[in-house]
Image: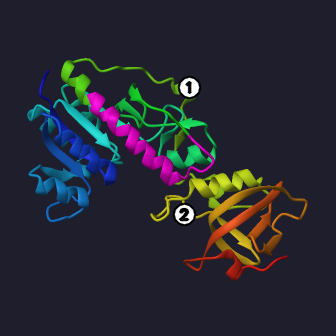
Amino acid sequence: MKRLRIALAAEESAGARALRLVEDTDHELVCVLTSGGESGAASALAKAARERGHRVEPASRVRSAELGVELRDRQVDLLVNVHSLFVADEAVVRAPRIGSFNLHPGSLPEYAGLNTPCWAVYKRESHYGPTLHWMEPGIDTGSIAYSDRFPLTDDDTGLSVSTRCIRDGLPLVARLLEDAACGVIPRHPQDLSRRVFYRRADVPHRGRVSWSFPAREIDALVRASDFHPFPSPWGHPRAVLDGARIGLVKVGLTAETSDAPAGTVRVGPGGVTVATQDEWLAVKAVQLGGSYVDPSDVLAGG
């Protein structure tokens, strides 16, 4: 089994776990490319990598062909990207002896691009999961090496699905290292006719809720946007209730059919419910003026 020379481009908690995963093998970690890689910067991952004696470089260097020359000169076998969002220069992608690989938090080719766990929740997919693919000059277009899928439930949020993709994605990286050391890595071309690409700015209905939507659609959008206690990439869906512009933080389905005009508010012992196109929707938490508040404290029936 060959001892590999690995360059790791990584961010956030997923990157920190990937760092530990590589460290737990006999392979050599040549460098870590991450935000905070600039001299004197102190992102959590950059600090941890430096403390462990690794060479740390700015994540943005993957955009430079110069890095490709360095990776070749340093005889790097694998470049592994875990949640780093810079698009790598073609010379960098081609530089490693075996290849470059990206751990994508979504099912390919149907969920390429950014914030795809949010989209999977919003679209109420039954299954979803991470994909580890060969990198090409395009974005999320390379052949699939490994993938995993898990069931989604009506309780899932953007955060819970993102977290599960990290948990289930790291074993795919471990499989990559094992197979690369043996010289055999799967390569399954994507069916790009099924490809859907999501941009950072893409948000359903521009993040706005109309009470004339079906209750399940509103519920799915709120859950997809829910990353509490962390900031949501979509923000909280915005709506108007009782004349006030609010962010919907938590809602819940009631299965109680409504024939009241959409947007009608009921306040009772069980809390606040609002009439939608088809049923009453429980509104459990809202954001008003930058603060999280109980809906019954700020909304009146009618």
Q: Mark 1 highlights which residue?
A: 193
Vertical placement of residue 75 versus 116, above or below: above
Q: Is residue 83 left or right of residue 225?
A: left
Q: Is residue 25 left or right of residue 210?
A: left
Q: Amino acid at mark 1?
A: Ser
Q: Which residue is drawn at the image coordinates 76% and 74% (left, top)?
A: 269
The secondary structure that dominates the magenta segment is helix
Name the mark nearer the viewer: 2 or 1: 2
Q: Is residue 60 left or right of residue 193?
A: left
Query: Could you tell me how far apart the alpha carbons at marks 2 and 1 are, in whole angstroms?
Result: 31 Å
Q: Which residue is drawn at the image coordinates 62% and 48% (left, top)?
A: 122
Q: Quadrant of the N terminus?
A: top left
**Residue nearest the observer in this picture, 180 or 205:** 180
Question: Residue 215 lies in magenta, yes or no?
Answer: no
Tell me whether circle 2 and circle 1 mark residues in contact (CB < 8 Å): no
Q: Which residue is drawn at the image coordinates 85% and 76% (left, top)?
A: 302
Q: Residues within 10 Å of mark 2 (few under 14, many from 20)?
A: some
Magenta stretch? 152-176
Vertical placement of residue 287 versus 134, above or below: below
Residue 173 visible at all:
yes
**Residue nearest the observer in this picture, 145 or 86:** 145
Task: Please provide percent x and percent y for residue 185.
Answer: 29, 21
Task: Please provide percent x and percent y for residue 139.
Answer: 41, 37
Vertical placement of residue 295 versus 279, above or below: below
Figure coloring: rainbow
Give the residue furthest to the front: 269
Q: In the drawing, what numbered circle is on residue 235?
A: 2
Residue 199 visible at all:
no
Q: Residues within 10 Å of mark 1 (few under 14, many from 20)?
A: few
How many numbered markers are drawn? 2
Q: In the drawing, what numbered circle is on residue 117?
A: none
Marked residue nearer the N-terminal end (2 or 1): 1
